[in-house]
Amino acid sequence: HEMNGFKCAIIDAPQLFESGFDDECDITIAVISDYEKQLQRIMLRDALTEQQAIERLSNQHTTEYFRNKCTYCIENNGTLEKLQRTVEQYANMFKGE
């Protein structure tokens, strides 16, 4: 994208650090939320029991992992609209607007 004149590209990469592709990124941003909010969302989205959701989260990196690895972290404990506004603010910051 840089060769085509773009200032930035957004990559949704759940395995970014495991793949080593983070070395190709100037900036990394994680969207994280509190543990309880993660549980609620997983149970609702995937129709899981609380125990199933706990097991799934136990196989994922913690928010602390992403806080330590990423350049920025966006807290997503509110509404979808609030998240969209925050993401737009970051996008505008990196586009130079």
Image: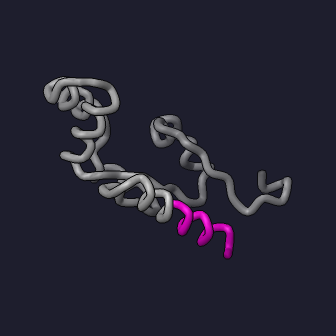
| Residue for point 56% across, 63% down | 88
- x, y percent for residue 36: 19, 46
Q: Is residue 48 magenta?
A: no
Which contiguous range is marked in magenta? Answer: 87-97
Q: Is residue 89 left or right of residue 97?
A: left
| Residue for point 32% across, 49% down | 65
Image height check: is 29 above or below 20?
Answer: below
- x, y percent for residue 75: 35, 59
Image height check: is 76 above or below 90?
Answer: above
Dividing the image into 4 quarters, which one contains the C terminus? bottom right
- x, y percent for residue 81: 44, 57
Q: Nearer the viewer, residue 67 or 44?
A: 44
| Residue for point 73% across, 63% down | 7
Q: Nearer the viewer, residue 85 or 14?
A: 85
Q: Nearer the viewer, residue 75 or 4?
A: 75
Main SS, magenta region, reads: helix
Give the residue furthest to the right. Answer: 4
